[in-house]
Amino acid sequence: MTRKPLLVLTMVFLFVFSLQVACFAESPANLPHIKILATGGTIAGSGATSSTTIGYTAAVAPVDALISNVPELKKVANVSGEQISQIASENMTNEVWLKLAKRVNQLLAQNDVDGIVITHGTDTLEETAYFLNLVVKSEKPVVLVGSMRPPTAMSADGMLNLYRATILAGSKDAIGKGVMVMLNDTIHSGRDVTKTITDRVDTFKAPEIGPLGFFTGDKPVFYRAALRKHTTATEFDVMSLSDLPRVDIVYHYANNTGTAIEAIAQAGAKGIVHAGTGNGSIGKAEYPAVEAAQKQDIVIVRSARVGNGIVARNGEANDDKYNFVAGDNLNPQKARILLMLALTKTADPKLIQEMFWKY
Ligand SMILES: NC(=O)C[C@H](N)C(=O)O
């Protein structure tokens, strides 16, 4: 065969081959299947002007609008959305938590779902993340995402957060890491993350412990993994529950005489988290209310309003004598989540203490 037809044949072959490669690279068939479950929050919010970043309305845009507002999602995953709720997350309830947890477990049990993104308000995002970290029964990635600016604002953070959370939920490196939180290019463990700044995009941090990893461009990079048990390694199962035990938090301060503890006990709480001063200290004037609550078999966890550090057993209180549970390094709102789930298993403070050292 002369050289010319061979050259033409080779060029035609290369052209067809490159088309196939291009199609394969982009074809939805080889992209991960990610479910986006929307609960509301600022990421679905709307402000009066393009500079409105406080005083906007949260929880306005439906999940399909969130997805269509980020067309790039189609390049990284096969996404579909479901609306679980449409609330500003300061209004989060046990009912939404149980509905969300059950739906997450149902979807992750399906072979055609590779991961889940949950869009959520930032106020209670850390609580939902820790709750799911303890009750999701799958190794597949679950990523909570929110934003500090509504989509109507200049330099809104929600679109890129949603895009990268979706990449993370489809990433093989994210499998088995527990429930994660991704905002501001930072990947956090649902157990350790907390909101630290009222009004800025860098609000989520894991004080003293640090993030699991970061995004560099569109690539997630992990530098550590959570050691405390989570997801499939926990004893908690909410699939048959229709409610959760009532647990309230009391804040300690100078001159506090335990009135809040009395009121919470009267309201029928099964557990109280005490946000103590310093290393989880309880004031002398609180003890009559504490002892009355314990006569009602209310389990008391000692946490600290300080937010960082470890509340150790028998440090600033005689936990053995009073049957308190030392809250380890969980802040009060996280300790409340664990105590609620612990009370679905037992009311024995000794067994609950073991759980605080495990999860
Ligand atoms: N940035 C936010 O999402 C705040 C809002 N209050 C919420 O938690 O829904």
Image: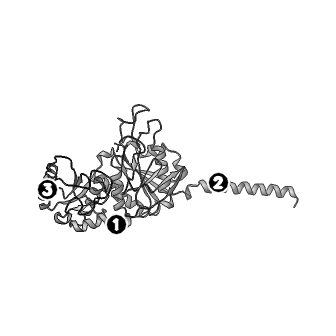
Circle 1 residue: 234
- Which residue is painted at 51% across and 49% down in the image? 73
Instruction: Pick the residue in front: 31 or 320.
Output: 320
Dot 1 lies on which element? Answer: loop
Using the image, tell me which numbered label, if any, was put on residue 22: 2
Q: Is residue 125 left or right of residue 212?
A: left
Q: Position of residue 197 (x, y in %)?
A: 37, 44
* Few, some or many residues within 10 Å of mark 3 (<14, 14–19, 20+): some
Q: Residues within 10 Å of mark 1 (few under 14, many from 20)?
A: some
Residue type (three-letter) at the residue carrying disc 2: Ala
Disc 2 crowd rating (10 Å Cα; few below 14, some 14-19, many 20+) is few
In the rendered view of the protein, which quadrant contains the C terminus? bottom left
Cβ of mark 1 under 8 A from ligand 1: no
Which three-letter amino acid code belongs to the residue tagged 3? Tyr
Question: What colouring style does the render use?
Answer: one colour
Query: Which quadrant of the render holds ligand 1?
Result: top left
What residue appears at the point 86 percent right and 55 percent down from the top-left corner?
4
Q: CA distance from mark 3 to mark 2?
A: 71 Å
User: Is label 2 in contact with label 1 (beta carbons under 8 Å)?
Assistant: no
3 or 1: tag closer to the N-terminus:
1
Look at discs 3 and 1 and give the one toward the viewer. 3
Where in the figure is residue 80, as x and y percent of width and height?
46, 52
* Nearer-the-camera pick, 184 or 156: 184
Q: Could you tell me residue 334's position as x and y percent?
A: 30, 55
Asked if residue 169 lies left or right of residue 130, the reply is: right
**Label 2's element?**
helix
Among the 4 quarters of the image, the one containing residue 340: bottom left
Q: Which residue position is annotated with label 3?
A: 287
